[in-house]
Image: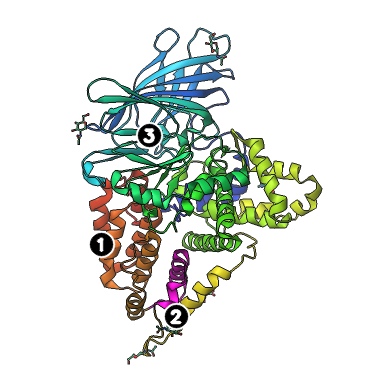
């Protein structure tokens, strides 16, 4: 997912204090134990019987807000077992059949815990000569499926048609289909989706055409020939149009946003070519972008063939397109070489930040690469300040036993991970030495799922002549200790320096003297530097008074700026200065879009300000039914509501 997408931890205080009390002594050992092929967040046992292909046949029912139909799974048995074990979350399973002869198969649903239950299905008794079976599961999703978002027409830009989209990462695929919901399993998929004829259906796959099925229904066919983990299955249904933006790329959006989107993401092909130069050939054939409705909880989601992005990237100046560089990078780091479970999420996200910033560096210059890294590091500092230097979730490789990975997501795997890879690149002699390794690593482990020690082993293999250098890395601290990284690389500060200097001038200005500021202070700053300037002020120990903020607004005109990142920082700075008149602006901002990167810190700021706390809670309660499950769940935690939402 796009970095920054989940800047803060979703934390269940109850759970943390339990860990703090009872687990720390075993922590490192437990982290090492998880290096087994097992996945603490899945019931499945792919080591015994594994799903190799998924064939979906679903009807999209907007009235009932469910998907109904069946999935046919190809299962290959490798161990001594008579069952295949799947994950399930809230699915209604009606029948399970042996496709070979249509006979029913027994199945048992286990007890439900917070993130799902175990679904055991007896394999056919007739032995298959090659140990492969096709089983058909007829089922329906729940109207409250955690991986699906159903929007009423009023919640779309056009206002006339309903909309539905999915978000499976980390472990919500199990709310959409019975599956082995662990990234250690990769399968190809095919799908036939029935939907109202006046809507478009898109998936994270190649299109195989549309069949009119008579009446108001059309069947949309897809196939994904590259084996993927189920968290990359994606579906969106809405009133959509497309526009070509490159030889292998279209943007898809509601027609109200299509022109703006095509403009904003016109650099897609340049980014793809740059990424191929760094990582090797692009194997997914097409790279399309879908601009989601505002309730999409993330910056972007790297669904193969079809990246999902938030409309908050539509800044009008392409300044926020770095999220696209990020999702493109995932075409290799994450989607080709995949973390085997979410304890090793940094292999997905840390490497993706690293590739993203290399792409940015190639396009905008190395100074920009470091500028972006410094901003990332700042986000990491803030996360660690919020959750504490010793928090167990600030480990690069945390222990997720008994924990929903959504509750562990933060900037840590992104930015601590990025820092680690950047540090190693410099230590080994820089990009000339490290980039060939990166290509070789990606080529060696493509189509596979790996853990941290697999990567480390390959690094040692590849740099046989530099074992001493590698041994100088403090592996244990980097991987299995909490807090900030043990080494911070010396980044080029050229582009951040001006932001800091301007921030200092504001902090030191005596507000009883005439304002020395004017618009020319910021006309030469890029949008990203304006964001950085505001971020500096936000993180400073001193608080800008309301009076200074009013002057700043008069001089720089932040209020009317549309760029969502500038709005975000500006609102937070206003709240920090306890500028009461800006509270309504903040409440509007957290209501009109659902990107967690934005709404969570603002809700937390509002919560921390006692006078407006209740107003924030009331706003959330009035709007939570319009939010995607994961955002509502997270904000409830931020507002200490700790209830089921
Ligand atoms: C965990 O693994 C690391 C790296 O292999 C090792 O240095 C460390 O001692 C291990 N910790 C425990 C508690 O086994
Ligand atoms: C296994 O055998 C069945 C029936 O003989 C055949 O249809 C299927 O293609 C085979 N599958 C594999 C993976 O070889
Ligand atoms: C779209 O088609 C459905 C039937 O499939 C119909 O109920 C609905 O009214 C149509 N919507 C519009 C806006 O035409
Ligand atoms: C500005 O003036 C006010 C009242 O005249 C005074 O209370 C305040 O301390 C002064 N601020 C500074 C920074 O000197
Ligand atoms: C704006 O401020 C700068 C530095 O504070 C000053 O040099 C410049 O003359 C000012 N420009 C205008 C138009 O006032
Ligand atoms: C902010 O305050 C902390 C603790 O009081 C201090 O360690 C830090 O250096 C200060 N930062 C700045 C930029 O002054
Ligand atoms: Zn990502």
The residue pinned by badge 3 equals 202
Q: On the picture, is 191 further left or further right than 448?
A: left
Magenta-drawn stretch contains 187: no
The quadrant the C terminus occupies is top left
Q: From this viewpoint, is residue 397 visible?
A: no
Picture quadrant of residue 489: bottom right
The residue pinned by badge 1 equals 614
For the point 58% across and 70% down, the residue is 494
Mark 3 or 2, nearer chain start: 3
Q: Residues within 10 Å of mark 2 (few under 14, many from 20)?
A: some
Magenta stretch, residue numbers: 519-544
Q: Where is residue 82 in the image (x, y as percent from the top left)?
A: 52, 16
The residue pinned by badge 2 equals 507
Q: Position of residue 621 (x, y in %)?
A: 25, 52
Q: Which of 460 and 11 is in front in this view?
A: 460
Q: On the picture, is 198 further left or further right than 527?
A: left
Q: Nearer the viewer, residue 300 or 261?
A: 261
């Amino acid at each position: 997912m796009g970095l920054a997408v989940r800047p803060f931890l979703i934390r269940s205080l109850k759970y943390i204090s339990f860990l703090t009390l009872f687990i720390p002594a075993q922590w490192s050992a437990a982290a090492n134990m998880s290096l087994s092929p097992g996945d603490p967040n899945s019931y499945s046992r792919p080591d015994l019987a594994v799903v190799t292909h998924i064939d979906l046949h679903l009807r999209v029912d907007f009235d009932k807000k469910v998907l109904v139909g069946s999935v046919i799974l190809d299962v290959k048995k490798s161990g001594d077992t008579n069952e295949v074990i799947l994950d399930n979350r809230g699915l209604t399973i009606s029948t399970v059949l042996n496709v070979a002869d249509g006979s029913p198969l027994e199945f048992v649903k286990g007890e439900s815990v917070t993130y799902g239950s175990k679904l055991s299905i007896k394999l056919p008794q007739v032995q298959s000569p090659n140990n492969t079976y096709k089983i058909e599961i007829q089922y329906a999703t729940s109207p409250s499926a955690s991986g699906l978002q159903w929007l009423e027409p009023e919640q779309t830009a056009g206002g006339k048609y309903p909309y539905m989209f999915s978000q499976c990462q980390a472990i919500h695929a199990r709310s959409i289909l019975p599956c082995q919901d662990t990234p250690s399993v990769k399968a190809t998929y095919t799908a036939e989706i029935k939907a109202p004829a006046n809507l478009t259906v898109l998936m994270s796959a190649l299109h195989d055409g549309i069949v009119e099925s008579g009446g108001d229904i059309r069947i949309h066919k897809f196939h994904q020939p590259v084996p993927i983990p189920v968290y990359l299955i994606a579906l969106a249904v809405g009133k959509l149009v497309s526009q070509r933006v490159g030889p292998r790329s279209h943007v898809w959006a509601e027609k109200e946003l299509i022109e703006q989107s095509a403009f904003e993401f016109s650099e897609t092909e340049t980014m793809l070519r740059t990424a191929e130069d760094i990582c090797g050939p692009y194997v997914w054939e097409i790279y399309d972008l879908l601009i989601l409705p505002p309730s999409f909880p993330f910056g972007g989601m790297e669904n193969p063939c079809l990246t999902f992005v938030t409309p908050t990237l539509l800044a009008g100046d392409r300044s926020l397109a770095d999220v696209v560089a990020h999702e493109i990078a995932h075409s290799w780091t994450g989607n080709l070489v995949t973390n085997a479970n979410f304890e090793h999420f940094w292999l997905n996200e840390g490497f993706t930040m690293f590739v993203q910033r290399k792409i940015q560096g190639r396009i905008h210059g190395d100074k920009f690469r470091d500028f972006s890294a410094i901003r990332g590091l700042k986000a990491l500092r803030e996360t660690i300040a919020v959750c504490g230097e010793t928090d167990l979730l600030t480990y690069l490789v945390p222990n997720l036993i008994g924990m929903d990975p959504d509750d562990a997501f933060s900037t840590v795997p992104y930015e601590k991970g990025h820092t680690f890879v950047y540090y190693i690149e410099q230590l080994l002699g820089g990009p000339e030495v490290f980039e060939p390794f990166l290509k070789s690593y990606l080529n060696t482990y493509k189509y596979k799922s790996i853990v941290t020690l697999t990567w480390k082993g390959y690094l040692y293999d590849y740099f046989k002549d530099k074992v001493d250098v590698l041994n100088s890395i403090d592996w244990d601290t980097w991987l299995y200790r909490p807090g900030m990284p043990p080494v911070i690389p010396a980044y080029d500060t050229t582009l951040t320096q001006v932001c800091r200097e301007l921030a200092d001038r504001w902090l030191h200005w005596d507000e009883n003297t005439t304002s020395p500021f004017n618009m020319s202070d910021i006309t030469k700053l890029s949008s990203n530097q304006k964001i950085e300037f505001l971020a500096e002020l936000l993180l400073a120990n001193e608080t800008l008074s309301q009076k200074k903020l009013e002057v700043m607004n008069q001089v720089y005109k932040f209020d009317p700026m549309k760029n969502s990142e500038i709005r975000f920082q500006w609102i937070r700075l206003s709240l920090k200065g306890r500028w009461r008149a800006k509270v309504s602006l903040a409440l509007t901002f957290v209501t009109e879009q659902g990107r967690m990167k934005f709404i969570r810190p603002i809700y937390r700021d509002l919560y921390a300000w006692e006078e407006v706390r209740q107003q924030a809670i009331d706003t959330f309660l009035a709007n939570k039914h319009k939010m995607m499950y994961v955002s509502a769940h997270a904000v409830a935690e931020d507002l200490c509501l700790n209830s089921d939402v």
